Amino acid sequence: MDDEEIICPCMGTTIREIREAVKNGSDTLEAVEAATGAGTVCGACTDELAALIEKLKNE
């Protein structure tokens, strides 16, 4: 997984930023949205974002 890959184009949120949010306790889609802004503009990335959060929680 490339930490510099952008998951949310609207906010420019990278995998690294999402990984950090999960590491810091944001373990739901809503919590990661609040922490990073990802998924809060058009919502097109929310399915991918939710799957990524689940994957990162299990690392």
Image: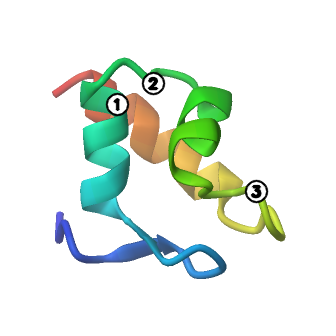
Percent position (x, y) of residue 25? 36, 18
Where is residue 1? Give x, y as percent. Answer: 17, 63
Q: Residue at x 51, y 50 (%)?
A: 36
Q: Is residue 45 above or below residue 23?
A: below
**Where is residue 45, by image quadrant?**
bottom right
User: Residues under labels 3 and 1: Cα distance?
Assistant: 17 Å
Instruction: Say what amino acid the circle numbered 3 marks.
Output: Thr
Q: Is residue 39 left or right of residue 53?
A: right
Along the viewing direction, whichever of 2 and 10 lies nearer the viewer: 10
Q: Residues within 10 Å of mark 3 (few under 14, many from 20)?
A: some
| Image vertical order of residue 36 relative to residue 13, above or below | above
Q: Is residue 38 left or right of residue 18?
A: right
Q: What's the distance in space between the residues labelled 3 and 2, CA to CA?
A: 15 Å
Q: Amino acid at mark 1?
A: Val
Label 2 sits on a secondary structure element that is loop
Amino acid type, mark 2: Ser
Name the residue carrying label 3. Answer: 40
Count the labels in the image.
3
Which is nearer the N-term, disc 3 or disc 1? 1
Which quadrant of the figure contains the C terminus?
Answer: top left
Mark 2 touches mark 1? (CB < 8 Å): yes
Q: Position of residue 21 (x, y in %)?
A: 36, 37
> Which residue is rendered at x = 45% and y = 24% of the image?
26
Residue at x 19%, y 66% (from the top left corner): 3
Q: Which mark is residue 26?
A: 2
Please report contact status of discs 3 and 1: CB closer than 8 Å, yes or no: no
Q: SS of the residue at dot 3?
A: loop
Judge whether 10 appears above or below 31 on screen: below
> Label 1's element?
helix
Residue with the mark numbered 1: 22
